[in-house]
Amino acid sequence: MLRMLTAGESHGPELTAILEGMPAGLPLTENDLQDDLARRQKGYGRGGRMSIEKDRARFTAGVMGSQTTGGPIALTITNRDWKNWRDRQIDPFTVPRPGHADLTGAVKYGYRDLRLSLERASARETAARVAVGGVCRRLLAEFGITIGSYVTMIGGETAELDVPSSDEVYQARFASAELSEVRCPAPAASERMRARIKRAFQSKDTLGGVFEVVMLGVPPGLGSHVHFDRKLDGILLGALGSIPSIKGVEIGPAFENAARQGTEVHDAIHRDEQGRLYRATNRAGGLEGGITTGEPIIIRAAMKPISTTINPIQSVDLATGEPAQTVYERSDHCAVPRAAVVGEALAAFVLADALLIKLGGDSLAELKARFADLRRSHIADLPMDNQPWTFGFQDEN
């Protein structure tokens, strides 16, 4: 139902994004996107570029009178740093940085100047995705669905966080993360992470880490088990895995679960006094069989250290074929806090698409009427009539 396309280079004049498939009648202004764009630029360990850019999205199509029209939404974000680069004489970039898209991009597209790779592969592009995610977040808010994130580890410094007992505890965790320079809701761990980043900066190195994205208020029944490309867990894993430098993604405590027995992992189903079904745990992370269960969706992503380091790394100059050291260009020292916000945006895009697929309709009014029916058909209201459920396959012969 939803399609997203972004265009633009890191030091080009602007970033452009097109979002197709958003229904008509959704109240939407440029200010609705501003908070997420600003949050993406925050965080201890960020590079100098963030002191130059003041990201703001401008709608150029699909929004009139502060409402979506149903047509494709187009938006642009100006790159303020472009004016500092447009008249510069820049030497060809010929020494690929290990871990970046410099060499692989050159091999694929035949570039003789690696800058053509790095300009598009740069995480600067994620500003456009965050703006699109802001539109999707605005749609989800109409149905009581919220998304937040927080950092759980940077450079080996880990926050030991309990599993929240309610949505309200998650919301409080989100709020605490917003007060931290490293987006960690645990103050003591936050200080350790900050100190670890400072040491990496002093040693001219970079750090990675882990963040969690949590989706609350998601109704059961989104996604599907009948087609591989409709399994919502697979779509979410792929979406967050597409963020630059993300090398691992899991739903719930997946890697911990892999070391346990099945009886210790699967969430038992209970029935309360009113006859409603519920689960006391959420080790599945809110998804079973590629379909939402109605529990919070919890997805965790591991980010490798940024590939651009002040300390040089051994490489080869592709212009001469001789050994060479990488050359440093401005970059973050730790981007984990900012990547978490990008993760929220992509989760919002995937969830909004799944919701539209489930509900159908071309206007917000249609969606809301159908969403009320979806809530009424909650899994807890399945018929309990003590009658056996039967099924069979018809024999055409």
Image: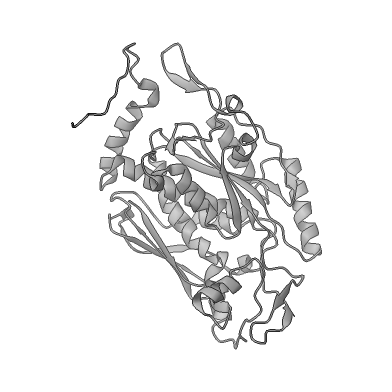
Query: Between residues 114 and 74, which one lies in front from this camera angle?
Result: 114
Q: Is residue 388 left or right of residue 277?
A: left
Residue at the image position 68 percent from the left and 82 percent from the top: 317
Q: Is residue 310 left or right of residue 397?
A: right
Number of callouts: 0
Quadrant holding the C terminus: top left
Q: Image quarter for residue 93?
A: bottom right
Indicate whether 302 appears above or below 117: above
Indicate whether 87 appears above or below 77: below
Can residue 326 be spotted in the picture? no
Q: Image quarter for residue 104?
A: bottom right
Percent position (x, y) of residue 312? 75, 72
Percent position (x, y) of residue 233? 47, 43
Percent position (x, y) of residue 286? 50, 35
Residue at the image position 28 percent from the left and 43 percent from the top: 360
Query: Between residues 91 and 171, which one lies in front from this camera angle?
Result: 91
Can residue 48 be spotted in the picture? yes
Indicate whether 381 appears above or below 96: above
> What colouring does the structure picture have?
one colour
Extreme-left residue of the structure: 397
Extreme-front residue of the structure: 397
Q: Is residue 239 left or right of residue 67?
A: right
Q: Is residue 254 left or right of residue 312?
A: left
Residue at the image position 31 percent from the left and 12 percent from the top: 387
